Image: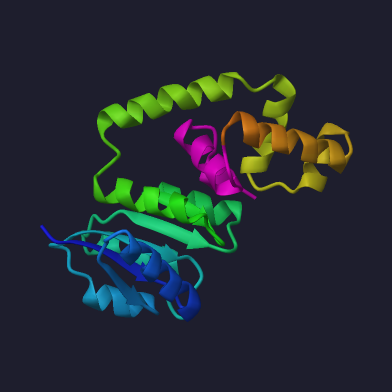
């Protein structure tokens, strides 16, 4: 079956570089500058995934994801965004996003995510192994690191967490980097995805 990666981004420069990257490893990439154009051209019969910008005029990425679901198209969605605030990341993952990557993204990170999405990498066994690893990383957090981890993934700012815990913002920054390192998270969306997977975040109780 023909494999396709749809790329949807209103930034022409970003669109061109993503398509070039995917084609450089032999993938067939189709580019669209709007969500509407992608939905009109999307073929549910293909083995495909979509690399989707979150913020676009007229129709944003979350609306495109919703439209795919309404049409019964089960296609892995990889979101990319230069503005990855916590509520958006949580909404994306809750609605079944495969991944959420911050711009400017690491090329290998994006390629790995696309390959995993196309190969249906979320098998039961893989998911269960991931969960075991995630649980182990959570267990490794000290009580203080956990105190910082939870408000962080709920969308509180460094200053607000500092006030809650009665310490300086600089101390919170230190704990934040330790939490990221212990959880093996590159960016905040990675951390939020882990919190959702572990059932620690309720999107209804976000800021």
Quarter the N terminus occupies = bottom left
Q: Residue 204, can we see it?
A: yes
Q: Height in image: 60 above or below 126? A: below
* Colour scheme in use: rainbow
> Residue 9 at what x, y percent from top left?
43, 73
In the drawing, does residue 5 fall left or right of residue 57?
A: left
Question: Which span of residues is magenta-colored?
Answer: 185-207
Q: Residue drawn at (60%, 56%), measured in percent from left and top?
A: 85
Q: Residue 67, can we see it?
A: no
> Residue 104 at what x, y percent from top left?
56, 62
Q: Residue drawn at (23%, 55%), measured in percent from left and top?
A: 74
In the drawing, does residue 27 fall left or right of residue 167?
A: left
> Residue 183 at what x, y percent from top left?
58, 31
* Quadrant in which residue 132 is drawn: top left
Asked whether 183 falls inside the magenta stretch, the response is no
Q: Height in image: 117 above or below 52? A: above
Q: Height in image: 41 above or below 128? A: below
Question: Is 126 or 196 nearer to us in this picture?
Answer: 126
> Residue 102 at what x, y percent from top left?
54, 57
Asked whether 204 falls inside the magenta stretch, the response is yes
Question: Is 172 or 174 nearer to us in this picture?
Answer: 174
* Quadrant in which residue 167 is drawn: top right
């Amino acid at each position: 079956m023909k494999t396709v990666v749809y790329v949807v981004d209103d930034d022409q420069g970003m669109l061109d570089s993503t398509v070039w990257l995917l084609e450089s490893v032999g993938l067939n990439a189709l580019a669209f500058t709007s969500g509407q154009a992608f939905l009109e051209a999307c073929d549910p019969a293909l083995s495909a995934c979509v690399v989707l910008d979150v913020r676009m005029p007229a129709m944003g990425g979350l609306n495109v994801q919703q439209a795919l679901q309404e049409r019964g198209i089960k296609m892995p969605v990889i979101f990319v965004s230069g503005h990855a605030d916590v509520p958006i990341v949580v909404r994306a993952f809750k609605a079944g996003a495969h991944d959420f990557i911050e711009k400017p993204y690491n090329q290998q990170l994006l390629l790995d995510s696309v390959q995993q999405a196309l190969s249906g990498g979320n098998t039961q066994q893989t998911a269960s192994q991931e969960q075991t690893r995630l649980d182990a990383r959570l267990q490794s957090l000290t009580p203080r690191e956990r105190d910082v981890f939870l408000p962080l993934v709920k969308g509180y700012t460094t200053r607000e967490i500092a006030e809650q815990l009665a310490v300086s913002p600089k101390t919170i920054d230190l704990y934040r980097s330790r939490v990221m390192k212990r959880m093996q998270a590159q960016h905040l969306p990675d951390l939020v995805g882990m919190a959702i997977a572990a059932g620690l975040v309720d999107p209804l109780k976000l800021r």
